[in-house]
Structures are given as C-alpha cells and as structure tokens.
Amino acid sequence: MAIAVGERVPDVQVMAPGPSGPTPMRTGDVLGSGRVVLFAVPGAFTPTCSDYHLPSYLVRHDEILAKGVDRIVCIAVNDPFVMGAWGDAQQVGDRVLLLADGNGDFTRAIGMEMDGSAFGLGTRSKRYAAVLQDGVVTGLFVEPGAGLSVSAADAVLETL
C-alpha cells in the first residue's frame, strides 16, 4: 500500500553522488527534519524526467525555498553514478539533492514502485512529489499516468 498523508517516511539507506564518490545517507536524516519537497522520477536521463520534471524544480528553486521549504530532494531507482552524471548534465549543483535508491528499498517501502519492464527499465519508481514536515507527509501528488501534471514544480508550488 502506498504511503499516505499523515504517515512518516521510512528510514532506509540510499546513496548520494558526490565529488569523492557515492555517499551513503539515511532517508530519516535527509527527509526527517524541516520542510522538504521530495520528488521521484522513473529514471535519470529519461525524456520527461530530463526535459521537464527535474528542470521544473531547478527553475522554481528559489520560489519553492521562499515558501519555507528547507530542501528539495529528487530520488530515483538508479545507481549513484548515473544520478551523479545526470546531475552534472542538468547542472543541478546544490539546488536539488539527488538520491539514488539503487535497490528500490525506499520506493518499495512507501509503495511507489512501478513495473517499467515494457520499456526495459525493470522495477522503478512512480512519478510523484511529496511535501514533508519533519519526515511526515503533508502533501502527496502521484501522477495518474505517464504524463507530468501534479508532481511538477509549478503544481507543487501552488500547494505550498
């Protein structure tokens, strides 16, 4: 069952790309304090994720933070090396923290896995965004299909 508003995100290990290589992080530490906008993409370098979803958060970064958000985090079922290369290609810098959920542990724990086998992707994350306050979901926006409407930065910004 998918996580719901009012529930706490699980504390699992994920990886963040970094200049010295992948860095293990706990979702409880990264997502568990302050106000966080978390969004998930099915895969780095995929068309909608690279052309629209991540860029929407880069463009709206300052506006989102001005609404009292402490950090913006993107998670995907990819390895940390791919996430690092994607961050470099998208010129993310420190505006969005990229997290690699390589084994899908976080994604599975919150019930957001999807079957991307038809596209050769295997098990990935659904496309969604969540607003968290001290690790508790206060807003959840899961895309109803393959498009990008409720989880892009513009849509989330309207709810903050």
Image: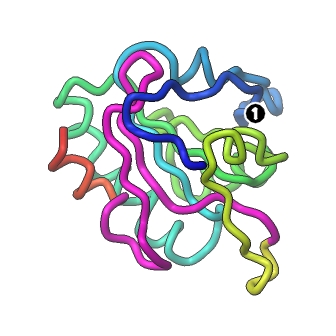
Looking at the image, residue 103 sits to the left or right of residue 159; the answer is right
Q: Residue furthest front?
A: 1
Looking at the image, residue 84 sits to the left or right of residue 150; the answer is right
Please report the bounds of the magenta region as a residue range. 122-151
Q: In which quarter of the image is residue 155?
A: bottom left
Q: Is residue 8 above or below residue 43?
A: above
Residue 144 colored magenta? Answer: yes
Q: Quadrant of the C terminus?
A: top left
| Residue that badge 1 annotates | 15
Location of residue 89 in the rendering, given as x and y in whole percent from the top left corner = 60, 59
Q: Which residue is drawn at 73% across and 53% down?
A: 77
Location of residue 139 in the rendering, given as x and y in whole percent from the top left corner = 32, 40
Residue 59 colored magenta? Answer: no
Q: Is residue 14 above or below residue 89?
A: above
Q: How many labels does the image show?
A: 1
Closer-to-camera residue (10/48): 10
Location of residue 24 in the rendering, given as x and y in whole percent from the top left corner = 78, 24
Q: Residue at x 40, y 42 (%)?
A: 130
Look at label 1 and name its amino acid. Met
Helix, strand or loop at disc 1? Answer: strand
